Image (cartoon, rainbow, N blue to C red):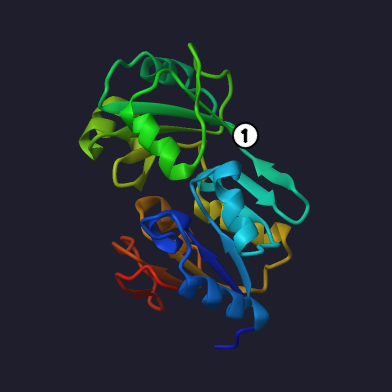
């Protein structure tokens, strides 16, 4: 397959990043070689702008990136948002989660590049350290938000916390459940990105590791999963259990 007219889209956490939240020299060199041969590279992550920006700069990404599991598309070259979606009509459910008192569950509301929380606990501290972000305590949930993240000390804790919202949530990490606006996903954002960046004629290879990556992988021409394969893989897909590109 020619290196030209190729678009490579990678998830960050659990895929491109190692356990220290760093990009290996091997992967960085591979991406640079791919770009030097005419390939386009971008990321599709659950992280919002401030948490993803260091990696965009490290890899010199020039085309739009997918943030917040598809809730935002950001152009690093122009330094502006091209798309941003708001979660609506879930005020009562979010209010219930905001009042939840548990050291085994954390609730985070994202609006643009702010992360609001009802209270602090160890799960929040661990999240801030991992993502290199700072959360703001708020007595009430924001009137509008891009997405809601529920972290459990175990995935069962997160499932119990979201309750009836479970069917609307996507698992983005081992103990993470995210509530996104209807119709929003990494896969839909990939389709939008190709149009916005004039990449409609590019062949896409996507790489991911969690259930929130399934829509991304199944909207690509080729895919590679670092962990479990999606339930409906394409015939031309591949699979391994390594995190190197």
Q: What residue do we see at 31% from left, 60% from top? A: 231
Where's residue 161, x and y in %? 28, 26
Where's the C terminus, which quadrant? Answer: bottom left
Figure check: 65 above or below 173 = below
Q: Nearer the viewer, residue 227 or 153?
A: 153
Q: Nearer the viewer, residue 70 or 35?
A: 35
- Does the rendering let one see residue 192? no
Where's residue 79, x and y in %? 75, 48
- Does the rendering let one see residue 139? yes
- Could you say whether the residue bearing mark 1 is in a helix, strand or loop? loop
Q: What residue do we see at 46% from left, 59% from top? A: 22
Where's residue 56, x and y in %? 62, 57
**Crowding near the residue tagged with mark 1, few <14, some 14–19, many ≥20 C-alpha atoms within 10 Å:** many
Q: Is residue 183 rendered to the left or right of residue 39?
A: left
Where's the N terminus, which quadrant? Answer: bottom right
Which residue in the structure is indicated by mark 1?
112
Q: What residue do we see at 49% from left, 72% from top? A: 25
Q: What residue do we see at 72% from left, 57% from top? A: 196
Where's residue 194, x and y in %? 66, 62
Q: Nearer the viewer, residue 216 or 34?
A: 34
Q: Is residue 184 rendered to the left or right of residue 118?
A: right
Q: Quadrant of residue 60?
A: bottom right
């Amino acid at each position: 397959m020619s290196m030209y007219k190729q678009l490579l889209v990678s998830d960050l956490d659990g895929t491109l990043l190692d356990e220290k939240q760093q990009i290996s020299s091997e992967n960085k060199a591979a991406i640079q070689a791919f770009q030097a041969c005419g390939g386009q590279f971008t990321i599709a992550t659950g992280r919002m702008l401030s948490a993803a920006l260091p990696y965009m700069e490290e890899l010199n990404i020039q085309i739009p990136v997918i943030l917040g599991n598809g809730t935002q598309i950001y152009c690093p070259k122009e330094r502006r948002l091209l798309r941003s979606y708001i979660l609506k009509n879930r005020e009562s459910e979010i209010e219930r989660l905001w009042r939840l008192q548990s050291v085994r569950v954390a609730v985070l509301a994202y609006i643009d590049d702010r992360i609001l929380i009802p209270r602090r606990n160890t799960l929040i501290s661990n999240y801030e350290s991992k993502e290199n972000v700072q959360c703001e305590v708020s007595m009430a949930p924001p009137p509008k938000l891009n997405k809601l993240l529920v972290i459990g000390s175990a995935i069962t804790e997160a499932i119990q916390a979201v309750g009836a919202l479970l069917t609307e949530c996507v698992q983005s990490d081992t103990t993470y459940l995210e509530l996104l606006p209807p119709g929003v996903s990494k896969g839909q954002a990939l389709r939008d990105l190709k149009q916005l960046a004039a990449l409609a004629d590019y062949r896409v290879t996507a790489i991911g590791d969690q259930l929130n990556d399934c829509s991304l992988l199944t909207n690509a021409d080729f895919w590679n999963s670092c962990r479990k394969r999606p339930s409906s893989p394409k015939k031309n897909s591949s699979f391994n259990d390594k995190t190197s590109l």
